[in-house]
Image: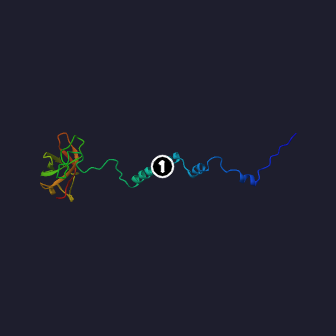
Amino acid sequence: MSSSTTTPPNAEDIIASPAVDGDLNAEMRNAAKPFSRTTLVLAGLVVLAIAFGGGAWTHAAFGTSSSAPTRPAGGNQGGQQAGTGQQGGGFRGAGGRGTTGTVDHVDGTTVYLKTAQGTDVKVSTSDSTTVGVTQAGKLADLKPGATVVVQGQAGDDGTVAAQAITQQAAR
């Protein structure tokens, strides 16, 4: 029976053997790259996701609470007439929300407007209709030639049931 005993290498043998089998420069380049291309792409995606989440949080915290874009009074009626800066036109269907025009005359509780397109709009009012003329006002405060914004619902006959009438500042 033979016994084979292996002796651990001594310090001289360890120092005398090469540290790397092959190209030392290639081994050093691999050691100098701690991140692979895949790791860098994934890190970039994480940064983008964090930026998107931060933007969404900022909008939720400081943005507007309305999900619909705001529109000036007059909504989507007509178009904007060049040079006047006024929304115009009558109502489009029963879903109209308002109009802008010039007061032609006031007859009792009815206001007659002329839009920027030249159409006449009859506006009915009630006790709950608010009238603003730079400050709270009454129907009698509306004068012919004044530009007003009417908010209300259009009836089948085209008459607007006003919820609010606001006189625009003189230009």
Q: Is residue 52 left or right of residue 166?
A: right
**Left or right side of 13 for 74:** left
Q: Count the marks.
A: 1
Q: Nearer the viewer, residue 36 or 81?
A: 36
Seen from the viewer's position, the closer of residues 80 and 71 is 80
> Which quarter of the rendered picture does the N terminus lie within?
top right
Residue 28 x/y as whole percent: 59, 51
Amino acid carrying mark 1 in the image: Gly
Q: Which quadrant: the C terminus?
A: bottom left
Q: Position of residue 163 (x, y in %)?
A: 23, 49
Where residue 58 sits, quadrant-wise, is: bottom left
- What residue is drawn where x is 47% and y is 47%? 45
Circle 1 — which element?
helix
Who's the residue at 14% across and 52% down the image? 103
**Along the line of sight, which residue is nearer the eye, 43 or 36?**
36
The location of residue 87, given as percent across then percent down, is: 20, 49
Query: Horizontally, is 63 left or right of 32 in the view?
Result: left
Residue on which the image places disc 1: 44
Please, is residue 56 above or below residue 156 in the view?
below
| Extreme residue in the right direction | 1
Residue 170 image-quadrant placement: bottom left
Identify the image's colour scheme: rainbow, by chain, secondary structure or one colour: rainbow
Between residues 71 and 98, which one lies in front from this camera angle? 71
Residue reaching furthest to the bottom = 135
Q: Residue at x 31, y 48 (%)?
A: 69
| Residue density around tag 1, few if under 14, some if 14–19, many if 20 or more, within 10 Å | few
